[in-house]
Image (cartoon, rainbow, N blue to C red):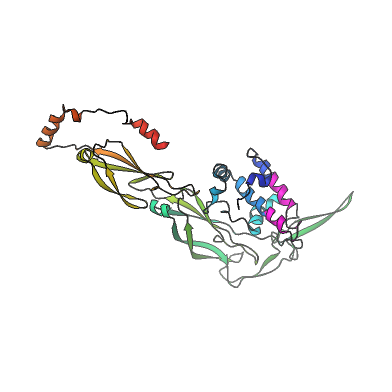
Amino acid sequence: MAKQDYYEVLGISKSSSPAEIKKAYRKMAIKYHPDKNPDNKDAEEKFKKAAEAYEVLSDENKKARYDQYGHAAFEGGQGGFGGGGMNMDDIFSQFGDIFGGAFGGGFSGFGGGSRQARVKGSNLRIRVKLTLNEIASGAEKKAKVRRKVQANGVTYKTCPTCNGTGQQTRITNTILGRMQTSTTCSTCQGTGEVIGSKPNGADAQGLVVTEETVTIQIPAGVTEGVQLKVGGKGNEAPGKNSIAGDLLVVIEEIPDEKLKREGTNIHYDLYISISEAILGASKEIKTVSGKVKIKVDAGTQSGKILRLRGKGLPSIEGYGTGDFLIHINIWTPQELTREQRQFFEKMLDDENFRPSPNTSDKSFFEKVKDMFS
């Protein structure tokens, strides 16, 4: 089933300002909030869709990609939520501040009752280097990550300040009568619990640093600077109901000595001798998808471009595969024997050796234009 347009979800236009996008999301989120719609699956689904739309449209880079490619921009784990939607923990940990005081502070169980906040741990960021071959086929990488986790033996108890509600209630007398206001508990920050005991070596929050090997699945076609997310592999947070942060993986492309990338296309300089250009030759070329044999026709001119369609890199947005472009360069020897020099001196006035391009021979600038079209 096709996903609904994010602008339609929030009821806004593409020209809406960041403030208008935020206002539209807040309106939708409050309208369909689980506390206002207990046990209403339809409202919960609309609540999630609104959050997913806001997660993309509130980010300048993600919004630009979405405007250009639509939902396909986030297939393959390229940011956003990869088409898998958002869960309630993601929404409340990322966008809880959007609701302001509409629901009395923190968030928790849905359908009323306690509003204990679910604390999310901080994210971690690492860089992963990839070769063009790994980018072409996708890769599985393993990385050692130092992250904070809850120490074994740490215990929690009900917060004495808010009695586990996560909120502090204040009643003030005004000329209009008694007014009650609720704010997030300053002792437990809305979680409703504090540390009861912690083992030696744990920090003040009951956390210890450990090293873990994390497996990262990298989709084919990623580009330099793309950021992937491995959910739940960041730092943990204190509390029995807390959730771990995410591991953000930034892609770094290792430059290839012979191949040059241009989007999904690959460029390769092939040098051939004058003899091969005149007589023709068969060459074996190593592409990102394996070795291929190509034929260089007799009489090939320097600057000719051979295009191997579909032998480039796949598009991470799912728009096919690029081409492998072979640029022919005729290598001119800088030193000649007496016999070789005498031969070419004889050919100076030979009609076959005089430049005589016909209308089908394109100029350098025409070739460049064709290459980028």
Q: Secondary structure of the magenta portion, mostly?
A: helix
**Residue at screen point 56% across, 56% down:** 123
**Residue at screen point 32% across, 46% down:** 258
Closer-to-camera residue (169/44): 44
On the image, the x and y values in percent for residue 132 come to: 39, 51
Q: For residue 239, which quarter of the picture?
A: bottom right
On the image, the x and y values in percent for residue 94 come to: 63, 53
Q: Quadrant of the C terminus?
A: top left
Residue 206 among those drawn in magenta: no
In the displayed structure image, the side of residue 12 where residue 36 appears, left or right? right
On the image, the x and y values in percent for residue 55 come to: 62, 49
On the question of residue 239 being in view, the answer is yes
**Residue at screen point 64% across, 58% down:** 87
On the image, the x and y values in percent for residue 206 come to: 60, 66
Closer-to-camera residue (199/162): 162
Closer-to-camera residue (113/311): 311
Please count the marks in the image: 0
Most extreme residue toward the bottom is 153
Q: Is residue 232 above or below residue 153?
A: above
Residue 28 among those drawn in magenta: yes
User: In the rendered structure, which segment of residues is drawn in magenta?
Assistant: 23-47
In the displayed structure image, the side of residue 360 where residue 217 appears, left or right? right
Q: Is residue 100 above or below residue 16?
A: below
In the displayed structure image, the side of residue 168 where residue 196 appears, left or right? left
In the displayed structure image, the side of residue 30 where residue 207 appears, left or right? left
On the question of residue 58 being in view, the answer is no
